[in-house]
Image (tube, rainbow, N blue to C red):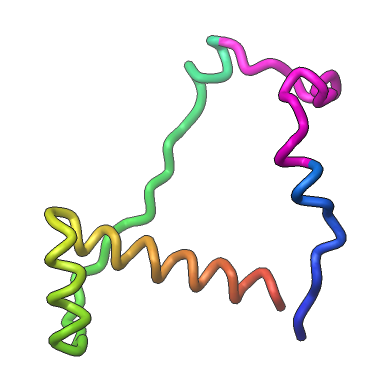
Amino acid sequence: MNRTSKTDWKRLAELDSDAIDTSDIPELDDAFFKEAELRVPAKQPVTLRIDEDVLAWFKAQGKGYQTRINKLLRQYMENHNSHR
C-alpha cells in the first residue's frame, strides 16, 4: 500500500524557523542530558555474500564502508516497518 503525504513540504521548506511555534515542546536542559542514555544496538558479526561490484563501490567511498552498509540496511528496515 502506497501512502501519499498530505504535507506541503515546499511550504515548510520555505518557512522561516522563527515562524514555527515550539511553545508546546519543552526545552531540553542540562538535567535531561545528564540522565539521558545512549542506546546503541549491539553489532553481530556475520558472513554476507555481496556482489563484487557493489562491495567495490562501497569500499571506494573510503573508510567506514561497513557502517554505511549498515545504515542503508537500517533505513530500509525502518521504512518497511513503518508501512505495517
The residue that appears at 83% across and 52% down in the rendered structure is: 8
The residues colored magenta run: 12-29
Image quadrant of residue 19? top right
Residue 32 percent coordinates (x, y):
57, 18
Q: Is residue 73 above or below residue 48?
A: above
In the depicted view, which residue is nearer to us: 68 or 20?
20
Residue 65 percent coordinates (x, y):
19, 62
In the depicted view, which residue is nearer to us: 31 or 56?
56
The residue that appears at 18% across and 55% down in the rendered structure is: 64
Image quadrant of residue 84? bottom right
**Quarter placement of the N terminus:** bottom right
Residue 45 percent coordinates (x, y):
19, 70
Image quadrant of residue 25? top right
Q: Main secondary structure of the magenta part?
A: loop
Q: Indicate whether residue 27 is drawn in magenta.
A: yes
- Taking the image as shown, residue 53 lies to the left or right of residue 28, namely left
Residue 17 percent coordinates (x, y):
72, 24
Q: Is residue 8 above or below residue 69?
A: above
